[in-house]
Image (spheres, rainbow, N blue to C red):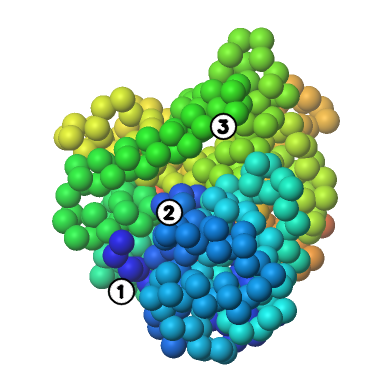
């Protein structure tokens, strides 16, 4: 796998400099987001030597050594160095437990390995919290967890050798100066390409190397098939339901009200029927769920409606591939319509999904808010996203079409005027400020 500059590298350095003597680092993320690649690059750059054990495909007698010698670390380390032909040096070597969910017993050993103090440890994995991967083991408290997500727009620009594009976007966001018609059009086209390619490293690598979107589509379809295969291995019942939810995410996001409604999947079904499947998709990091905050305040997680949520896909490039029965890049009319914002389907779902993706990559939890006017209880207002910082909350409305109307945003600011600040409309046009509302082009969402 080709290595790309990733922002998570700074978090790895922070762990190494400040926490590695007391904690292992656990990197979670969906399959194919580049966990193994970034960790191995980090090990090469920052350590004298490293030993990487892929527990999906361990060498020789690796797991037998763990079973036999977990209480004899001298023997365990000696055998592993021979098995992997690596010389470890006390205080200057890293041991990587890759795909740790495939062998949870090694994760349970972390407590004793940290106490031993010879080496430093990073674990990577998907489906870390799935019940079968944690039952009958004691989860170590000597872990720091971080999430790894697909590339955001800035990382995509770096990967494509277009650092200046990202730098220009950042500069104008900070100065609040409009970019102008020509520059905005160029960057908007680059962002549309990012939406189409997505942020999965394999897809980005294919695009960066070949600029062939048809090959990119093949890579994305392969990742979708991989996820579907994973769902097929979920215990009977839940796997079928998880696959049903996954396949219907485009339909759920195209609906006028995007909150999850099981009746759209199967007539007469209830949310409870899909609870375990939604949880699996969340824990597999395939879905980014956005919950309805009933009384939005600075602690958005304190008052959420667990039954009212939206399911966004982890990557907008995958969502586009999942949405079309035909290959969008092979259909020239469809491809041109996408780049020009003239698709006949609801493009709002792609805009909302990519904003959710950028916010999540920036470390934000996802929350929205539904509310009704007291004198008009039938009319539902919705603010797409809410961020919290300090004493205030910041509402965000996403628009794919050209419109100066944002009734829900105005009503929200009126209702929560004591705590709401700096409302934002994310749209497809240039940056501007009007009437106390900041209008940001969608390619700036990663900067919020």
Residue wearing tag 3: 234
The residue drawn where x is 46% and y is 76% is 81
**In front: 48, or 356?**
48
Q: Please report whichever mark, 1 or 2, sits nearer to the chain's N-terminal start.
A: 2
Spatial distance from mark 1 to mark 2, Cα to Cα? Answer: 41 Å
Give the quarter of the figure containing the C terminus.
bottom right
Decide: few, some or many residues near mark 2? Use Cα within 10 Å; few <14, some 14-19, many ≥20: few
Q: Nearer the viewer, mark 1 or mark 2?
A: 2
Residue 17 picture location, percent across and down? 59, 86
Mark seen at residue 164: 1
> In what element is the residue under mark 2?
loop
> In what element is the residue under mark 3?
loop
Badge 1 vs badge 2, beta-carbon distance below 8 Å? no
Would you identify the image quadrant in which residue 49 lies?
bottom left
**In front: 387, or 89?**
89
Spatial distance from mark 3 to mark 2, Cα to Cα? Answer: 20 Å
Q: Is residue 276 left or right of residue 126?
A: right
Residue 26 picture location, percent across and down? 60, 64
Q: Is residue 185 visible?
A: no
Q: How many marks?
A: 3
Q: Is residue 410 left or right of residue 433?
A: right
């Amino acid at each position: 796998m080709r290595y790309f500059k990733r922002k998570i590298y700074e978090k790895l350095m922070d762990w190494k400099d400040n926490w590695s003597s007391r904690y292992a680092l656990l990197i979670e993320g969906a399959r194919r987001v580049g966990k193994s690649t970034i960790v191995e690059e980090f090990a090469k750059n920052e350590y004298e030597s490293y030993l990487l054990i892929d527990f999906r495909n361990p060498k020789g007698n690796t797991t037998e050594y763990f079973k036999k010698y977990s209480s004899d670390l001298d023997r365990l380390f000696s055998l592993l160095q021979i098995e992997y032909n690596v010389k470890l040096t006390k205080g200057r070597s890293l041991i990587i437990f890759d795909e740790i969910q495939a062998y949870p017993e090694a994760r349970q050993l972390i407590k004793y390995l940290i106490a031993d103090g010879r080496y430093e440890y990073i674990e990577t994995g998907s489906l870390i919290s799935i019940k079968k991967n944690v039952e009958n083991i004691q989860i170590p408290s000597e872990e720091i967890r971080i999430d790894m997500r697909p590339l955001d727009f800035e990382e995509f620009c770096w990967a494509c050798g277009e650092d200046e594009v990202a730098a220009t976007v950042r500069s104008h966001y900070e100065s609040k100066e409009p970019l102008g018609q020509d520059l905005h059009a160029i960057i908007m086209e680059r962002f549309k390409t990012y939406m189409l390619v997505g942020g999965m490293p394999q897809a980005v690598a294919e695009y960066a190397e070949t600029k062939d979107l048809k090959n990119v589509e093949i890579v994305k379809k392969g990742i979708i098939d991989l996820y579907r295969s994973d769902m097929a291995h979920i215990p009977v019942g839940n796997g079928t339901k998880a696959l049903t939810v996954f396949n219907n995410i485009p339909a759920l996001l195209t609906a006028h009200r995007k909150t999850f409604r099981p009746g759209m999947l199967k007539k007469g079904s209830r949310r409870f029927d899909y609870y375990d499947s939604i949880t699996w998709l969340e824990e597999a990091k395939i879905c980014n769920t956005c919950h309805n905050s009933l009384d939005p305040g600075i602690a958005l997680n304190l008052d959420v409606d667990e039954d009212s949520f939206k399911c966004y896909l982890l990557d907008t490039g995958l969502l586009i591939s999942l949405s079309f029965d035909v290959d969008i890049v092979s259909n020239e009319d469809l491809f041109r319509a996408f780049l020009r914002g003239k698709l006949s389907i609801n493009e709002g779902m792609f805009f909302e999904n990519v904003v959710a993706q950028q916010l999540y990559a920036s470390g934000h939890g996802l929350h929205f808010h539904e509310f009704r006017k007291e004198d008009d209880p039938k009319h539902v207002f919705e603010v797409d996203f809410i961020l919290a910082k300090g004493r205030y909350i910041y509402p965000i409305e996403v628009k794919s079409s050209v419109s100066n109307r944002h009734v829900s945003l105005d009503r929200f600011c009126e209702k929560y005027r004591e705590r709401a600040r700096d409302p934002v409309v994310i749209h497809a046009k240039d940056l501007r400020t009007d009437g106390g509302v900041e209008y940001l082009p969608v390619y700036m969402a990663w900067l919020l």
